[in-house]
Image (cartoon, helix red, strand yellow):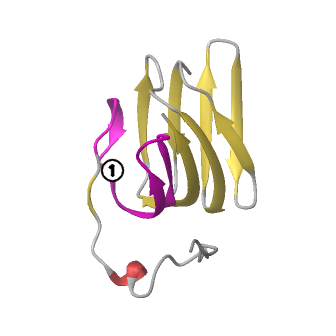
Amino acid sequence: MSKPVRFSPSGPHGWMQVDDTPLKTAELIDGTPRGLDHVYHQRAESGLVTGIWRSSPYTEFYDSYPVDEFMYVVDGSVTLEGEDFSETFRKGDAFLLPKGFKGRWKQTESMVKYYVVVT
């Protein structure tokens, strides 16, 4: 029987005390991103993945974002910049980064987010 999955802003027990590790980026522009990801729930057959993610400041460029990803900013902020826009998302904001997004992910501070990815 399936049951609800609780998302905690501090991640699973002890998660905030775990050391950060280097993060993979699309095309790194600035910074040395270190962070951690925890998957709360996934369904391989449907391509659904949900979790919590944290990272130190960095900037990267996406030529084509590989998935549709819904994000809720738990702490910190990120600015997304494209050819004709720049929008900052802060603590408490939610947004969708659509598959195919072309532009910059610019984090000037550490960030924690919940995410729901569909591949």
Helix, strand or loop at label 1? It is loop
State the residue at coordinates (70%, 46%): 89
The rendered magenta stretch, by its main secondary structure, is classed as strand
Q: Which residue is mark 1?
A: 33
Q: Nearer the viewer, residue 84 or 26?
A: 26
The extreme front residue here reads 1
**Image quarter of residue 86:** top right
Q: Amino acid at mark 1?
A: Pro
Residue 58 x, y percent position in the rendering = 41, 44
75 shown above or below 24: below
Please state the extent of the stretch shown in magenta in the rendering: 24-52
**Residue 110 seen in this snapshot:** no
Number of residue marks: 1
The extreme top residue here reads 83
Give yes or no for residue 28 being in the magenta stretch.
Answer: yes
**Residue 87 seen in this snapshot:** yes
**Image quarter of residue 3:** bottom right
Q: Quadrant of the N terminus?
A: bottom right
88 shown above or below 90: above
Residue 102 x, y percent position in the rendering = 53, 18
Residue 61 x, y percent position in the rendering = 43, 26
Is 108 on the left or on the right of 57, as rendered? right
Residue 14 x, y percent position in the rendering = 39, 87
Give yes or no for residue 43 being in the magenta stretch.
Answer: yes
State the residue at coordinates (51%, 27%): 104
